[in-house]
Amino acid sequence: MKTKTRAGRRRLEADQDEESQGHQTSSEEDTGLLYKENGKSKNQDSVKSKRRKQSSSGKEHSVRRLESNERERQRMHKLNNAFQALREVIPHVRAEKKLSKIETLTLAKNYINTLTATIINMTSGSLPTTQGTGTDIGGKFYQHYQQQHGEEDNDEHLKKYSTQIHSFRQGS
DNA sequence: TAGGCCATCTGGTCCT
DNA sequence: AGGACCAGATGGCCTA
């Protein structure tokens, strides 16, 4: 997998950095080396301000960095798993090609709107009252929906959703 | 080859 | 204080 290769390469570079700079005591030298080795060309002001903030020793800093990089990777993996789970519950046409993140979010939003509109249509705004509590769920649900969507036509959501699916299909 | 999408790294900021 | 979260930067892969 491309990412593992790249991540592995970068980790290896970071490890080599750490080994080769055992003699270095300046965190500025450390940071400079890191940017050079990564081939990055950030604007100088940003680099300077970042250098200024650095206070721990080079070795300590790299260890912390590697640890937080790992945590960040795990966090992003969790986020991607959540995206995947979301993709699996949204009906869409283009099954042979994975939905992008933006497509997933947009489609999900419209799908929710469509389902909500459908429920409203089916119940005509009056879901059963909860026994004993006297709470009118249907009424509250309908009220909340109206607050969110105003006088918008319920069918409009279905149109939006099917239009979007259609455009994604054309995009494949 | 340009543009879209993505994974990763990174430093700053927020939260517990 | 340390971890979570965020946004910018970078570079790789893929497709039209």
Image: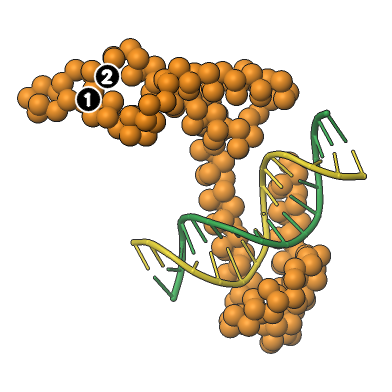
Chain colours: A orange, B yellow, C green
Element under disc 1: helix
**Percent x, y of residue A48:** 69, 79
Q: To which quarter of the image does residue A13 belong? A: bottom right
Q: To which quarter of the image does residue A146 belong? A: top left
**Residue placed at 72% from the left, 25% from the top?**
A171
Q: Which mark is residue A125?
A: 2
Relative to A85, residue A5 above or below: below
Q: Amino acid at mark 2?
A: Gly
In this view, the residue in front, A58 or A146, is A146
Residue that badge 1 annotates: A139
What residue occupies the far bottom of the structure in this picture?
Answer: A25
Relative to B13, residue A142 above or below: above
**Percent x, y of residue C1:** 44, 76
Query: Distance between the Cα atoms at labels 2 and 1?
Result: 6 Å
Element under disc 2: loop
**Residue placed at 45% from the left, 17% from the top?**
A155
**Percent x, y of residue A29:** 74, 82
Q: Is residue A22 visible?
A: no
Dot 2 or dot 1: first in sequence order is 2
